Amino acid sequence: MSKTFGPKAIEPLLNYGHKHFGENKVQECTNKWPELKNKYNNINLHMIGKLQTNKVRDCVKYFDFIHSVDSKKLAKKICDEQKKINKNLKMFIQINIGGEEQKSGVSKNELGELVVYCKELNLNVLGLMCIPPMDINPSKYFNETKELNKKFNFKELSMGMSSDYLTACNYSSTYLRIGSNIFGKRN
């Protein structure tokens, strides 16, 4: 996650060969990544944050992965925008695994319906993504997400951030969203 960090902080990683970077906001991506993507080959940009439908066009244009598909409306908009530019993004369905009102993600009760809908749209859904509740041992949430991922026969799993990535690895996470452990924290 390179959110809030500019090209000067990112380029040493690019020069070292790092190819995967996450952003929380489409606007931040459009301000810093086009030039970097032209300069460096094979960069994969991951949209991690809440994606609003009015930002989907730019998201599809610049990103390679979306980790936050959480509704039929958003899935349909992504599908339509991909078709316009003949692009096939890799995606994760974000589940609100802790049932927290303040967090994005589809509820566990509506997950199956969204998975079916995404398959009907031929979206390239790799797996599920979750952000467990803060200040609680994430193990039970990671395990539950892992089991749901298996239930839908997904191969990839996006869970774990700087504070809990080691625990996420114990529950088969294949995509970790690490930012502050690499770039440090912004005040």
Image (spheres, rainbow, N blue to C red):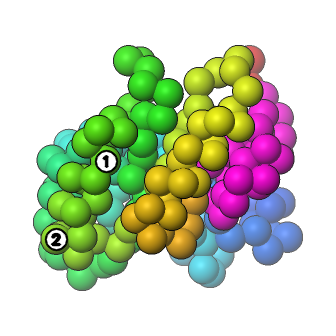
Locate residue 100, reporting x and y percent: 44, 21
- Res 105 visible: yes
The residue carrying mark 1 is 111
- Residue placed most toward the observer, 16 or 122: 122
Q: Secondary structure at mark 1?
A: helix
Q: Which mark is residue 180?
A: none
Locate residue 4, reporting x and y percent: 62, 35
Residue drawn at x 73%, y 27% is 137
- Res 39 visible: no
Locate residue 48, reporting x and y percent: 50, 47
Residue drawn at x 59%, y 32% is 132
Question: Which amino acid lies under the numbered mark 2 shown in the image of this protein?
Answer: Glu
Q: Left or right: 127 with respect to 132?
A: left
Residue 120 falls inside the magenta stretch: no
Quarter-of-image position of residue 75: bottom left
Residue 179 falls inside the magenta stretch: yes
Highlighted magenta segment, given as a residue range: 158-185
The residue carrying mark 2 is 120
Q: Quadrant location of the C terminus?
A: top right
Question: Which amino acid lies under the numbered mark 1 shown in the image of this protein?
Answer: Leu
Residue drawn at x 64%, y 21% is 134
Mark 1 to mark 2 CA distance (whole Å): 14 Å
Q: Nearer the viewer, mark 1 or mark 2?
A: 1
